[in-house]
Structures are given as structure tokens and as C-alpha cells.
Image: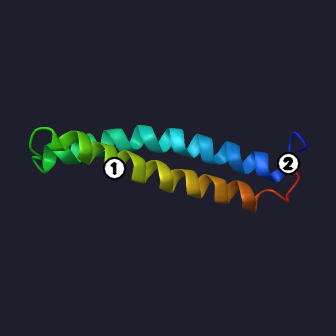
Amino acid sequence: MAKDSCLSRMAAGAAVGGAVGCAVGVMYGSFEAMRCKVPGVEKIRFVGQRTIGTAAVFGLFLSAGALIHCGKSY
């Protein structure tokens, strides 16, 4: 596989999107858990679900953006 192939760009976009999504998901999930007054140990599950969901969405959109820009050369 070439160094600058489309697949490697998509994988890099998904990885960066996942990392950013995790950070945003933890902050958003924590805020929502406090706002909704989620009890005790349920907070861990609540924040985890928000983190995974946000990371998946960010990763999907950044990899899709990489796929769109794959054929363009600047």
C-alpha cells in the first residue's frame, strides 16, 4: 500500500476523529450526567455510552471527509 493511499488517509481520519470524539464525549457525557442527575455507578455507563457514540460519529465523518478529498491534489 502506498504511503499516501486513500485507505491510509481514511484510517488516519478515523483515528483522529475517534480521538477527538472521545475527548468531546467524555466532556459532554460528564456534563449530561451531572445535569440529568444520573445516580451512582450508572454515571460510568452513561459517560461511556456518550463517549463511544461521539467517537464513532466523529470518526465516521472525518474518514468520510478524507474519502471525499482523496482524489483531489492541491
Mark number for residue 62?
none
Reading the image, the residue beneath label 1 is: 50
The picture quadrant where one finds residue 45 is top left
The picture quadrant where one finds residue 26 is top left
Q: Is residue 67 left or right of residue 32?
A: right
Say if 68 sits above or below 62 in the image.
below
Label whose residue precedes the other's in the sequence (1 or 2): 2
- Helix, strand or loop under label 1: helix
User: Pointer 1: residues within 10 angstroms few (<14), some, or many (20+)?
Assistant: many
Tell me which residue sits at (57%, 57%) in the image.
60
Tell me which residue sits at (73%, 59%) in the image.
67
Q: Nearer the viewer, residue 68 or 52?
A: 52
Question: How far apart are the two marked residues, 1 and 2, measured between alpha carbons?
Answer: 32 Å
User: Pointer 2: residues within 10 angstroms few (<14), some, or many (20+)?
Assistant: few
Tell me which residue sits at (52%, 52%) in the image.
58
Numbered circles on residues, count: 2
Reading the image, the residue beneath label 2 is: 5
Tell me which residue sits at (9%, 43%) in the image.
39
Q: Are marks 1 and 2 in contact (CB under 8 Å)?
A: no
Q: Quadrant of the N terminus?
A: top right
Q: Amino acid at mark 1?
A: Arg
Residue 5 percent coordinates (x, y): 85, 48
Residue 46 percent coordinates (x, y): 24, 47
Residue 31 percent coordinates (x, y): 23, 43
Q: Amino acid at mark 2?
A: Ser
Q: How was the colour assigned to the protein in this rendering?
A: rainbow
